[in-house]
């Protein structure tokens, strides 16, 4: 059985799909940090594109404006206009939610760009002129303007449509456009006390949800059964489920990842697999993984689990301020090879915060130096294709005295 934990006192009534207001002091501190970064970049305003999905950067709108777009649907997009001085503006594309948004957004100025009543053309056709008019309204049209966009760490996974770049060219045609695609990640890499409290809370919700999923696991149960149990428990604790990305459960079998998170596959005796679980709450994300086997594990399966945990403990010992992301990846590779494993996960881990996957990435190309109060997932997956797999994933706050683990679920191999 998964180790029981209880955080019922943290469950909140979420009402009719609304979100908690951001404390004024937190919103003001975030805006001050943003404007400090804008000053370093030498821009007088920041125009931000925030799509309705993670790789498109939904985090920008949540972090600054405390706004979550509708659904999110394929055409749900948000634009933020942040001047160095004066009130920022939130532009959304749904008239019906403007008044609702005003109840919880941190921005007083909320406007709608009515893309839905366009008789023809591309949906971004109206956006460029609207943002240009805003710049003119604020006497900023001829200034240096930053362009904020891209999810999951900025340049590495921006996923910004060309039509959005075209919008920026129209909006700033009288001024100078400056790339600010990593601004959000640069100012959020080191977490505040408020951030860490939010991450601890969502990690506990995720652990309870994953524990509920593992509790229904047995021979003959389906992957879909696990997902349903996880969502029921996580939702009861206030988890925000806008789409599968926000509360996903991925089952990864020994033959490798598949194109679907879960199916109606029914577990058989001898199956060994990873259960990777995500949760969202309060603008923060959690991403953890545990391993399970149906029936007594074979010697090979037990060896994979034991080896992976040995690599994980070595990484944990090395997780201190001053180590680089690349060095942690090298430790994972070296230890895996020493233990006789040729197949490993591509990363040794990644940052987590307002996104489940964010900078730093523990990869051979990332030279980021870890600092106090960064929050990092260690994820040293080991695989023997067709036989066994283990992809332990745990969340830590980087501390000078040693990493602080904030995911309370047992890491023991789950045997059903």
Image: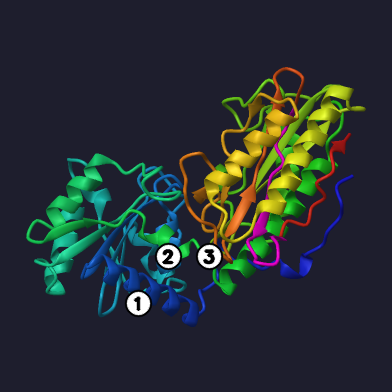
- On residue 108, the disc is 1
Q: Tell me whether the residue at label 3 lies in contact with that at label 1, contact meaning CB atoms closer than 8 angstroms.
A: no
The correct choice, above or below, for 87 with respect to 350 in the image is: below
Q: Quadrant of residue 310?
A: top right
Q: Is residue 209 visible?
A: yes
Identify which residue is drawn at 16% across, 67% down: 135
Q: Tag 1's secondary structure? A: loop
Q: Earlier in the sequence, mark 2 or mark 1?
A: 1
Check disc 3 and report the residue beneath it: 18
Q: Is residue 142 left or right of residue 179?
A: left
Q: Nearer the viewer, mark 2 or mark 3?
A: 2
The residue furthest top is: 386
- On residue 85, the disc is none
Percent of width and height locating residue 116: 27, 49
Percent of width and height locating residue 154: 38, 50
Mark 2 → mark 1, Cα distance in angstroms? 23 Å
Within 10 Å of disc 2 (Cα), the crowding (few <14, some 14-19, many 20+) is some
Mark 3 → mark 1, Cα distance in angstroms? 17 Å
> Magenta segment, which residues?
389-404
Q: Nearer the viewer, residue 188 or 89?
A: 188
Q: Nearer the viewer, residue 234 or 405?
A: 405
Identify which residue is drawn at 59% across, 59% down: 375
Within 10 Å of disc 3 (Cα), the crowding (few <14, some 14-19, many 20+) is some
Percent of width and height locating residue 304: 79, 29
Check disc 2 and report the residue beneath it: 187
Mark 2 → mark 3, Cα distance in angstroms? 26 Å
Q: Nearer the viewer, mark 2 or mark 1?
A: 2
Q: Nearer the viewer, residue 390 or 231?
A: 390
Within 10 Å of disc 1 (Cα), the crowding (few <14, some 14-19, many 20+) is some
The residue furthest left is: 174
């Amino acid at each position: 059985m998964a180790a029981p934990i209880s955080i019922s006192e943290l469950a909140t009534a979420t009402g009719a799909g609304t979100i908690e207001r951001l404390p004024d002091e937190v919103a003001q501190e975030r805006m001050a940090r943003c404007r400090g970064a804008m000053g370093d970049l030498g821009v007088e305003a920041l125009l931000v594109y925030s799509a309705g999905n993670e790789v498109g950067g939904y985090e920008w709108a949540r972090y600054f404006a405390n706004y979550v777009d509708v659904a999110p649907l394929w055409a749900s997009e948000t634009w933020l206009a942040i001047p160095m001085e004066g009130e920022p503006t939130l532009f959304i594309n749904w008239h019906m939610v403007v008044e609702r948004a005003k109840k919880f957004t941190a921005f007083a100025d909320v406007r709608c760009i009515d893309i839905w009543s366009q008789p023809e053309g591309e949906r971004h056709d109206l956006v460029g002129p609207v943002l240009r008019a805003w710049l003119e309204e604020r006497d900023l049209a001829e200034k240096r303007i930053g362009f904020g966009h891209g999810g999951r760490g900025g340049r590495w996974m921006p996923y910004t449509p060309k039509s959005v770049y075209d919008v920026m060219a129209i909006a700033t045609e009288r001024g100078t456009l400056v790339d600010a695609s990593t601004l959000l990640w640069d100012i959020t890499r080191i977490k505040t006390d408020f951030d860490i409290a939010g991450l601890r809370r969502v990690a506990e919700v995720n652990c309870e949800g994953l524990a509920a999923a593992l509790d229904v696991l047995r021979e003959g149960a389906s992957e879909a059964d696990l997902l349903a149990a996880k969502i029921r428990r996580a939702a009861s604790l206030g988890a925000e489920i806008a789409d599968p990305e926000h509360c996903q459960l991925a089952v990864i079998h020994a033959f490798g990842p598949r194109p679907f998170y879960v199916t109606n596959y029914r577990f058989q005796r001898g199956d060994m697999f990873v259960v990777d679980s995500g949760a969202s709450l309060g603008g923060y994300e959690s991403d953890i993984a545990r391993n399970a086997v149906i029936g007594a594990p074979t010697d090979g399966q037990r060896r994979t689990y034991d080896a992976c945990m040995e690599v994980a403990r070595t990484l944990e010992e090395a997780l201190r301020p001053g180590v680089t992301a690349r060095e942690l990846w090298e430790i994972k590779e070296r230890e895996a090879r020493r233990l006789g494993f040729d197949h490993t996960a591509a990363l040794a881990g990644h940052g987590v915060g307002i996104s489940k996957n964010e900078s730093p990435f523990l990869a051979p190309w990332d030279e980021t130096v870890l600092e106090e109060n960064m929050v990092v997932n260690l994820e040293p997956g080991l695989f023997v294709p067709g036989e066994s797999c283990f992809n332990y994933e745990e969340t830590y706050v980087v501390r000078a005295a040693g990493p602080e683990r904030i995911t309370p679920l047992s890491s023991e191999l789950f045997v059903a």
